[in-house]
Image (spheres, coloured by chain):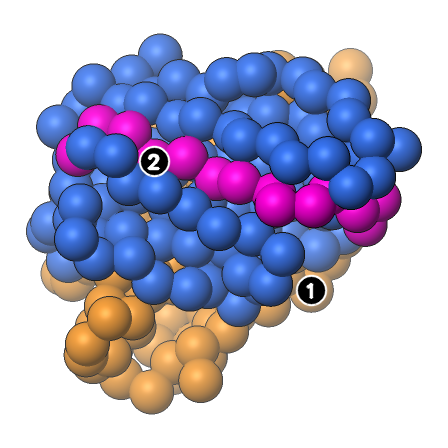
Amino acid sequence: AQSVAQPEDQVNVAEGNPLTVKCTYSVSGNPYLFWYVQYPNRGLQFLLKYITGDNLVKGSYGFEAEFNKSQTSFHLKKPSALVSDSALYFCAVRDLTTRGSTLGRLYFGRGTQLTVWP
Amino acid sequence: DADVTQTPRNRITKTGKRIMLECSQTKGHDRMYWYRQDPGLGLQLIYYSFDVKDINKGEISDGYSVSRQAQAKFSLSLESAIPNQTALYFCATSDLQRGAEQYFGPGTRLTVT
């Protein structure tokens, strides 16, 4: 079964400091991995994804994520946090080996609330 | 994302009423999804459709039904609303590529009293 875990409900960081939002996954085969961000009263916005290739993926707004197959992790990072980065962040996984009608489904984590204080 | 629109944006309804949430997209995507978001639970998949003739249940389809009227339109219905269906509902779309990300609408906040 496919699943995603975001072990921290909340992450708090000071502006200018580096931030990390953690994500681990479980799939039966090779994963596609995604990060989304949700600002208040808005839908989810795509940040970045890992499909194949370089384990370090760069995305929107200066975010990046590192795929670690041995640790089954895909942590979201940013070198210098901004107050405007405060939002709810979701990790999601798609199992490449799944066939049939479930192909294409995303499985989401429960979300991590990031707060960046001035 | 303005390419995916949802109506209404907010709705308050009473227990037992039938209600329909509508989703339209201009991205030309074949795949459409309905999710429900509850605080602390993340997103749960209600239904998804890979084309007009293909409708699939997600993990929480009980109490819901859908209609894919066209490639661009995917509606979610609550046949007889109950209070625990109070939630934020999102529509999303994606194209056929296996690595494709999903694009989300702005959401509908539904309250069932």
* Dot 2 crowding, Cα within 10 Å, few <14, some 14–19, many 20+: many
Residue at left 78%, top 41%? B16
Q: CA distance from mark 1 to mark 2?
A: 34 Å
Can residue B73 be found in the magenta stretch?
yes
Front residue (pair A56, A23): A23
Q: Could you tell me residue A12's position as x and y percent?
A: 78, 38
| Image colour assigned to chain B | blue
Residue type pointed to by label 2: Phe
Q: Does residue B2 belong to the magenta stretch?
A: no
The label shown at residue B74 is 2
**Residue in the image at 24% along x and 71% along y:** A101
- Which structural element holds mark 1? loop
- The answer to whether residue A61 is left or right of residue B43 is left
Q: Which residue is mark 1?
A: A7
Give left or right: position of A32 versus B83: left
Q: Chain of mark 2?
A: B
Kindly indicate which chain is depicted in orange in the rendered structure.
Answer: A
In front of the other: B18 or B38 = B18
Residue A117, image quadrant: top right
Q: Quadrant of residue B73?
A: top left
Quarter of the image with the C terminus of chain B is top right
Q: Residue at x 19, y 76 (%)?
A: A100
Figure check: B21 above or below A68: above
Residue A5, picture quadrant: bottom right
Discs 1 and 2 lie in a common subunit? no
Residue B1 falls left or right of residue A99: right
Q: Quadrant of the N terminus of chain B?
A: top left
Query: In the image, what residue occupies the spot 32% across and 23% down?
Result: B24
Q: Is residue B84 above or below residue A105?
A: above
**From which residue to which does the magenta span run?**
B71-84
Q: Amino acid at mark 1?
A: Pro
Q: Nearer the viewer, mark 1 or mark 2?
A: 2
